[in-house]
Amino acid sequence: MIREWTLRPANIADAEAMSALVDSLLANWLVPDGHPQALARMRQIHRPAQIARQINDGFRYWLAETADQSLLGFVALKPPAHLFNLYVQEPWHGRGVGSRLWQQLQQAVRANGGDCITVNASERAIPIYRHWGFVETEPMQCHDGLRFQPMCWRAQITD
Protein backbone atom coordinates (compact mmCIF):
# COMPACT_ATOMS: atom_id res chain seq x y z
CA MET A 1 0.00 0.00 0.00
CA ILE A 2 1.39 3.39 -0.98
CA ARG A 3 1.19 5.92 1.82
CA GLU A 4 1.41 9.67 1.91
CA TRP A 5 3.55 9.27 5.03
CA THR A 6 6.05 6.97 6.74
CA LEU A 7 7.10 5.93 10.24
CA ARG A 8 10.54 6.26 11.77
CA PRO A 9 12.09 6.21 15.24
CA ALA A 10 12.29 9.66 16.80
CA ASN A 11 15.42 11.28 18.16
CA ILE A 12 16.21 14.23 20.38
CA ALA A 13 16.27 16.61 17.39
CA ASP A 14 12.53 15.88 16.92
CA ALA A 15 11.54 17.07 20.41
CA GLU A 16 10.68 20.63 19.37
CA ALA A 17 8.25 19.48 16.65
CA MET A 18 6.66 16.92 18.98
CA SER A 19 6.13 19.57 21.64
CA ALA A 20 4.54 21.92 19.09
CA LEU A 21 2.18 19.16 17.92
CA VAL A 22 0.96 18.57 21.49
CA ASP A 23 0.49 22.31 21.99
CA SER A 24 -1.72 22.42 18.87
CA LEU A 25 -4.01 19.77 20.38
CA LEU A 26 -4.34 21.14 23.91
CA ALA A 27 -7.49 23.21 23.60
CA ASN A 28 -9.65 20.87 21.52
CA TRP A 29 -8.46 17.43 22.52
CA LEU A 30 -6.38 17.23 25.67
CA VAL A 31 -7.77 19.89 28.00
CA PRO A 32 -11.06 20.90 26.37
CA ASP A 33 -12.35 22.55 29.56
CA GLY A 34 -9.33 24.90 29.58
CA HIS A 35 -8.40 24.06 33.18
CA PRO A 36 -5.34 26.30 33.83
CA GLN A 37 -3.50 23.79 36.04
CA ALA A 38 -4.08 21.00 33.50
CA LEU A 39 -2.84 23.16 30.63
CA ALA A 40 0.29 24.06 32.58
CA ARG A 41 0.93 20.41 33.48
CA MET A 42 0.52 19.24 29.87
CA ARG A 43 2.90 21.95 28.64
CA GLN A 44 5.43 20.96 31.30
CA ILE A 45 5.24 17.24 30.43
CA HIS A 46 5.67 17.98 26.72
CA ARG A 47 8.40 20.62 26.79
CA PRO A 48 11.13 19.81 24.25
CA ALA A 49 13.68 19.35 27.08
CA GLN A 50 11.36 16.88 28.84
CA ILE A 51 10.79 14.86 25.66
CA ALA A 52 14.56 14.79 25.07
CA ARG A 53 15.07 13.60 28.66
CA GLN A 54 12.54 10.81 28.15
CA ILE A 55 14.31 9.67 24.98
CA ASN A 56 17.61 9.64 26.89
CA ASP A 57 15.91 7.69 29.71
CA GLY A 58 14.84 4.89 27.35
CA PHE A 59 11.36 5.94 26.24
CA ARG A 60 10.86 4.84 22.64
CA TYR A 61 9.22 7.30 20.26
CA TRP A 62 8.10 6.78 16.67
CA LEU A 63 7.03 9.54 14.29
CA ALA A 64 4.64 9.59 11.37
CA GLU A 65 5.79 12.15 8.85
CA THR A 66 5.26 13.20 5.26
CA ALA A 67 7.91 12.89 2.57
CA ASP A 68 8.99 16.49 3.31
CA GLN A 69 9.36 15.52 7.00
CA SER A 70 6.28 17.35 8.29
CA LEU A 71 5.24 15.74 11.56
CA LEU A 72 1.80 14.14 11.44
CA GLY A 73 1.85 12.33 14.77
CA PHE A 74 3.89 10.38 17.25
CA VAL A 75 3.64 7.61 19.79
CA ALA A 76 5.76 7.02 22.89
CA LEU A 77 6.40 3.80 24.77
CA LYS A 78 7.41 4.01 28.41
CA PRO A 79 9.11 0.67 28.97
CA PRO A 80 8.20 -1.97 29.46
CA ALA A 81 4.60 -1.59 28.22
CA HIS A 82 2.91 1.77 28.86
CA LEU A 83 1.58 3.77 25.93
CA PHE A 84 2.75 7.14 27.24
CA ASN A 85 1.71 9.40 24.33
CA LEU A 86 -0.14 9.06 21.05
CA TYR A 87 -0.91 12.27 19.21
CA VAL A 88 -1.95 12.97 15.61
CA GLN A 89 -2.36 16.35 13.90
CA GLU A 90 -6.07 17.10 13.69
CA PRO A 91 -6.29 17.16 9.85
CA TRP A 92 -4.89 13.62 9.85
CA HIS A 93 -7.45 12.15 12.26
CA GLY A 94 -9.31 9.23 10.71
CA ARG A 95 -6.65 8.56 8.06
CA GLY A 96 -4.92 5.61 9.72
CA VAL A 97 -1.98 7.49 11.23
CA GLY A 98 -2.95 6.78 14.85
CA SER A 99 -3.73 3.15 14.10
CA ARG A 100 -0.35 2.64 12.44
CA LEU A 101 1.45 4.31 15.35
CA TRP A 102 -0.47 2.06 17.76
CA GLN A 103 0.51 -1.02 15.74
CA GLN A 104 4.18 0.02 15.85
CA LEU A 105 4.11 0.34 19.64
CA GLN A 106 2.17 -2.91 19.98
CA GLN A 107 4.73 -4.76 17.83
CA ALA A 108 7.59 -3.40 19.94
CA VAL A 109 5.98 -4.54 23.19
CA ARG A 110 5.10 -7.97 21.82
CA ALA A 111 8.61 -8.43 20.40
CA ASN A 112 9.84 -8.17 24.00
CA GLY A 113 7.35 -10.77 25.21
CA GLY A 114 4.72 -8.33 26.47
CA ASP A 115 1.04 -9.15 26.19
CA CYS A 116 -0.47 -6.25 28.17
CA ILE A 117 -0.19 -2.54 27.35
CA THR A 118 -1.51 0.18 29.65
CA VAL A 119 -2.57 3.74 28.83
CA ASN A 120 -4.04 6.70 30.69
CA ALA A 121 -6.49 7.83 28.01
CA SER A 122 -7.76 11.37 27.75
CA GLU A 123 -11.55 11.53 27.76
CA ARG A 124 -11.79 12.29 24.05
CA ALA A 125 -9.48 9.36 23.20
CA ILE A 126 -11.40 6.67 25.09
CA PRO A 127 -13.48 5.60 22.03
CA ILE A 128 -10.43 4.92 19.85
CA TYR A 129 -8.70 2.97 22.60
CA ARG A 130 -11.86 0.89 23.07
CA HIS A 131 -11.89 0.33 19.30
CA TRP A 132 -8.31 -1.00 19.54
CA GLY A 133 -9.34 -3.44 22.30
CA PHE A 134 -8.43 -1.52 25.45
CA VAL A 135 -10.70 -1.88 28.49
CA GLU A 136 -11.07 0.34 31.54
CA THR A 137 -9.15 -0.92 34.57
CA GLU A 138 -10.09 1.73 37.16
CA PRO A 139 -12.57 4.60 37.49
CA MET A 140 -11.85 7.89 35.73
CA GLN A 141 -8.97 9.72 37.45
CA CYS A 142 -8.18 13.41 37.87
CA HIS A 143 -4.73 14.75 38.83
CA ASP A 144 -3.61 18.37 38.48
CA GLY A 145 -6.84 19.05 36.62
CA LEU A 146 -6.08 16.36 34.03
CA ARG A 147 -8.86 13.82 33.59
CA PHE A 148 -7.85 10.41 32.28
CA GLN A 149 -9.11 6.86 32.07
CA PRO A 150 -6.69 4.04 33.04
CA MET A 151 -7.03 1.29 30.44
CA CYS A 152 -5.28 -1.92 29.42
CA TRP A 153 -4.96 -3.91 26.20
CA ARG A 154 -4.24 -7.61 26.41
CA ALA A 155 -3.12 -9.82 23.54
CA GLN A 156 -5.64 -12.44 22.55
CA ILE A 157 -4.64 -15.98 21.67
CA THR A 158 -5.76 -15.30 18.08
CA ASP A 159 -3.61 -12.12 17.79
Image: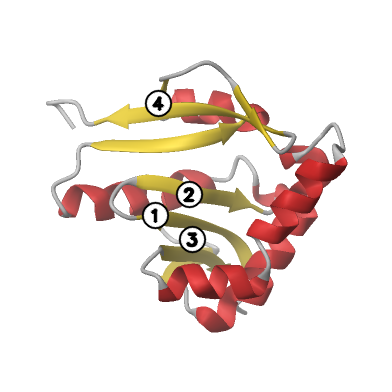
Q: Which mark is residue 134?
A: 4
Q: Are marks 3 and 2 in contact (CB under 8 Å)?
A: no
Q: Residue at x 81, y 40 (%)?
A: 28
Query: In the rendered structure, which amino acid carries the disc numbered 3?
Result: Arg
Q: Residue at x 63, y 66 (%)?
A: 18
Alpha-carbon span between mark 3 and mark 2: 25 Å
In this rendering, does residue 129 appear at all? yes
Q: Which mark is residue 78?
A: 1
Q: Is residue 32 above or below residue 7?
A: above
Query: In the rendered structure, which amino acid carries the disc numbered 4?
Result: Phe
Query: In the rendered structure, which amino acid carries the disc numbered 2?
Result: Phe
Q: Residue at x 65, y 61 (%)?
A: 46
- Between marks 3 and 1 in the image, the one whose residue lies nearer the viewer: 1
Q: Is residue 29 above or below residue 157?
A: below
Residue 95 position within the rendered picture, expressed as x and y whole percent measured from the top left: 58, 45
Q: Which mark is residue 84?
A: 2
